[in-house]
Amino acid sequence: MLNTVKPKVTLVGAGPGDPDLLTLKGVKALAEANVVLYDALANEEILAHAPKESIKIFVGKQIGNHAYTQDQINQLIVDNALTYGNVVRLKGGDPFIFGRGSEEIEFAGSFGIETVVVPGISSVVAVPASLGISITKRGVSESFWAITGTTTDRKLSSDVALAAQSSATVVILMGMHKLSQIIDLFQKENKGHLPVAIIQNGTTYEEKVGVGTVDSILEIVKERKLSSPAIIVLGEVIRESNILKGFYEEFVSKEIVR
């Protein structure tokens, strides 16, 4: 299906997981795609918006299982745009929030390829919101931190220690493998009773939730067998969620009994 259309790359944010949370602009971009390069965190149901004859290539990266390196993904984007014309790069959440979207757009642009960005609904705010957690709330939290739990050198971000000292809500992505380190930092700030919510596969049918406090969350994660991909939320706003109230009261009552 060789195409003479001018090369173009559209970076589309797929949203937090629920395929209905893809934006209308994202739907329109997919409808015009000749090639779709999609990530592990992009719900595959979304691919139905692309033409049946379009080429669909999985380029997801998961811990210990990378289909392609980032350099290879960058080259695939360019090669397919030059060969087939219209490429949609579909990334989970919003591609500019811990998604390396800017790197991919810059690489394509260096070849003179037209680039367009379609923002996505970020899981940073959407996943907590789906459970009634407003990450900012008047009189409770004036701001929030959004932090990657694992940096490019595979270490815990130093920003977590700074965030633990603040009164802001803290939302950590890609942090489950560093959870014990995260908890240690909050305990050092005497925040053992601070509410914590961990949401695995948020907004999807596979969603699992664990709610407790800094002092109890590690045990809860073990009991509920929570793992990646998950979002870690720490803050007093969790107490304000009507949806999670039952969960929170259940785990807090267990702590009191102990």
Image: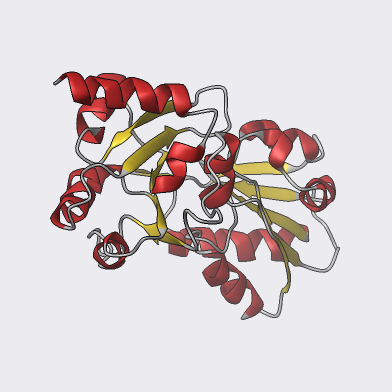
Q: Residue at x 63, y 46 (%)?
A: 15
| Image quarter (top left, top right, bottom left or bottom right) of the C terminus | top left
Q: Nearer the viewer, residue 258 or 174?
A: 258
Q: Residue at x 32, y 48 (%)?
A: 175
| Residue 14 visible in the current orientation | yes
Q: Position of residue 45 (x, y in %)?
A: 68, 31
Image check: 13 left or right of 215?
Answer: right
Quarter of the figure with residue 12: bottom right
Q: Nearer the viewer, residue 93 or 216?
A: 216
Q: Position of residue 210 (x, y in %)?
A: 36, 28
Q: Position of residue 206 (x, y in %)?
A: 50, 23
Q: Residue at x 33, y 64 (%)?
A: 166
Q: How many marks?
A: 0
Image check: 68 left or right of 166?
Answer: right
Indicate how the structure is coloured in the image: secondary structure
Q: Residue furthest front?
A: 139
Q: Nearer the viewer, residue 225 or 242?
A: 242
Q: Is residue 136 above or below residue 247?
A: below
Quarter of the figure with residue 155: bottom left
Image check: 127 left or right of 185?
Answer: right
Q: Residue at x 66, y 53 (%)?
A: 120
Q: Position of residue 82 (x, y in %)?
A: 71, 66
| Residue 66 visible in the current orientation | no
